[in-house]
Amino acid sequence: MSGIFLSWSGRDVLAVTSLKNQLAGLRVPIWEYRDQMRVGDTIHETVVDAIADSFASVICFSDETAQAPWIQDELAWAYLAYGKDTSRILPVWVGPHTANLKPRLIDQLNIAVGDVIIDQGRENLIAKINAVTGAKPPLMVPAAIFALTANESEPLLQNPDLLRLCDGFGMRTPPELVAQLRLRYGTSADDFSPLADQQPIKSIIDDTIDHVNAIRKTEKLRPIFLRWMHHELSGNLGDEARRDARKRWRSSPSLLVIDSISTLDANMTTRLDNLIEERSAILWVPPYTLHTNTASDLLRRTAERLERLSDALVDWQEKIEPQFAIDAPSELSVRLWLHRTFVALSDTARPDKKRVRCVQNVFGGPTSLKEITTTPTNVSPAFSGTPQQ
């Protein structure tokens, strides 16, 4: 196999399945018993052989499963199979761990445990896997969701502009409308669920990226890893984390998911105007996501609250811009937009036009392709097609 062995307990099945799908999308070969065990195989021998043939083992657990016998056995087998090389043992919490419980051998060997519940933890795990396997790293794309919490959104749900917009789409009237809109919000941006099935949009995007990576693999393009950083950008994790996140945000293409209702909050608008970059792919989520009526003028007025988006609405037909979705009324439309945006995302960074112009001003040189490719007036016979004597 020469890939990664995945050890886990059935009680963590949902979290492990999500992690497995992401790793598979990142082209990491995974050995996991649901896929690789064949009828008639001897479990002990098959698992031991799989561990011995792997680059590393990812040991998945939570407080509830840290002492599960099967995890303890597979961990011990990995330790022996790797010649006691603990760098190839990658323990991670995949579920709740308020007590920070670990398998006994992890404690005895003092191996650091990652936390893939948080985005930084997943990024760290992928970096360790790449180091062990020698695989080419994925294309890291900063991503952020800007949506208010349930408590923060409450004062906005009676906003006259919002009520007029909703009325224009044939939505319910208060108090039914307000009750419906409340369903979009939770305790953090991670809970933002504007679509009909109440599934968090973050989960929909992550799932879609897994499928995008499958397509990119066939096109021989590097897989994409979305690095969610709205908590860092919002300052929730401290000033240093916020500075680091802003630096990464400005250095590469990014994905910005914006709840249109939240932009009625003046503080949110200020924060967003400082984040929208030329290379940001923007998913603008309107308030009528349970309705599919078309009302371009109303949509335009809500989007024009942000100056950068107003420009994009004018410029999109005249020059190449990152993908800009203003209409996301259903899960299908979100998935289609994500596919268009990420399937063809280039592995290599494009030159920054502003920096190119700055270099040209300092050093001179051609300003257009035509200047570079002008046909020369004097061509020696060797290159003119004249036969040599």
Image: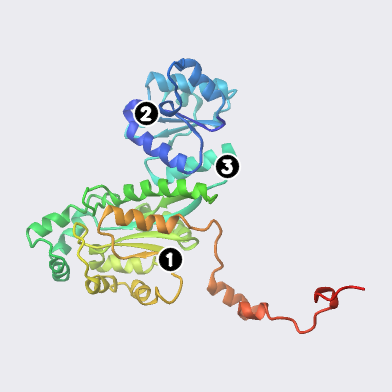
137 vs 49: above or below: below
Residue 71 can be seen, yes or no: yes
Q: Are marks 3 and 2 in contact (CB under 8 Å)?
A: no
Res 158 label: none
* Element on which disc 2 rests: loop
Q: Which residue is mark 1?
A: 322
Expressed as whole percent of the image width and height from the top left, the position of residue 21 reads: 41, 39
Res 101 label: 2
Q: Is residue 7 left or right of residue 12?
A: right
Decide: few, some or many residues near mark 3? Use Cα within 10 Å; few <14, some 14-19, many ≥20: few
Decide which of 231, 181 is in the foreground and name it. Answer: 181
Residue at 19% in and 55% down? 151
Q: Residue furthest right?
A: 389
Q: Which residue is mark 3?
A: 135
- The type of residue carrying mark 1 is Pro
Residue at 58% in and 27% down? 85
The N terminus - image quarter: top right
* Element on which disc 1 rests: loop
Residue at 60% in and 40% down? 134
Expressed as whole percent of the image width and height from the top left, the position of residue 166 reads: 15, 65
Expressed as whole percent of the image width and height from the top left, the position of residue 86 reads: 55, 28
Q: Is residue 380 left or right of residue 82?
A: right
- The type of residue carrying mark 3 is Ala
Decide which of 56, 247 is in the foreground and name it. Answer: 56
Mark with earlier residue (3, 2): 2
